[in-house]
Image: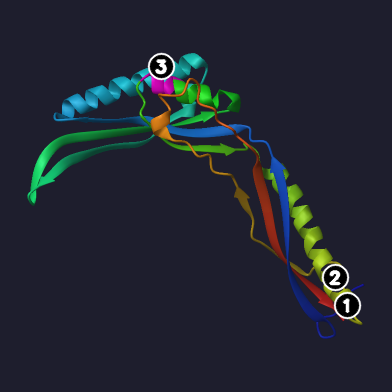
Amino acid sequence: MYYPHFQAKRLKVSGEGNISVAPDQVNITIGAITEKKSLQQAQEENARIISNVIAALVELGIPKDQIQTVIYRIDTMYDYQDGRQIFRGYQVTHQLLVKINQIELTGQVVDLAVSQGANSVSNIEFTVVHPEAYYNEALKIALQNAYQKALTLTSQLPVNLNPVPYKIEDFSQVISPPVPLATTMLAKAEATPIQPGEITITATIIAHYFYC
């Protein structure tokens, strides 16, 4: 049933849909932080570690195009004594973003990198490579949720609801649970256990309906 604008009143409700899926890709930010009095020595040590890490990951089966430098930084380090700034040396930071499609290798990749001298794991993010299909399912649930809310509200009143919204606003997001990881514990563990859990893909909408 169609309700002309001049006859109908408007109702705005929110709707939310959630789809929980198992991740099929993990992004690990891992690298080396070296500090030496000499900048050249700090760079050389850092380059040796990173080269060893990359070679080990490639040997494990991770393609080189899935290993990318995301941070390379040189910082001057100082100590402070009696209000004086005393030069301590240079710190070189090199971080790699490693994308892995076999998420069961996550702990092995971390341990392998650490065994080659990596001493920094700043982020582990589980994702899905193609979230669109799951997102569309979440959108359907969100629309159903909004309609049920509108129906519940109008059913308490002597009015008729047009079940087809005349406007839909999309406020969607993908939520990935954080993975806590203590970097200082990596070298102590026999094998680093990494649990991927599930990713929740959420679609949130605002649906506008006519009723009269």
Span colored in magenta = 112-116
Way the structure is coloured? rainbow
Report which residue position mark 3 lands on. Answer: 55
Between circles 1 and 3, the one closer to the viewer is: 1
Kind of residue at badge 1: Gln
**Structural distance between the alpha carbons of marks 1 and 3:** 67 Å
Residue extending farthest to the top is 59
Residue 94 visible within the image: yes
How packed mark 3 is, by other alpha carbons closer than 10 Å (few <14, some 14-19, many 20 or more), is some
Q: Can you tell which quarter of the image residue 177 is in?
A: top right
**Structural distance between the alpha carbons of marks 3 and 2:** 61 Å
Kind of residue at badge 2: Thr
Judging from the image, what secondary structure is the residue with disc 2 in? helix
Q: Residue at x 75, y 57 (%)?
A: 142
56 to the left or right of 162: left
Q: Residue at x 66, y 46 (%)?
A: 200
**Quadrant in which the N terminus is drawn:** bottom right
Disc on res. 156: 1
Nearest the eye: 128 or 114: 114
**67 shown above or below 123:** above
Is residue 113 one of those drawn in magenta?
A: yes
Kind of residue at badge 3: Ala
Disc on res. 152: 2
**161 shown above or below 51:** below
The x, y position of residue 168, in whole percent, is 72, 65
Q: Are the residues tagged 1 and 2 within 8 Å (C-beta)?
A: yes
Disc on res. 14: none
The x, y position of residue 74, in whole percent, is 24, 37
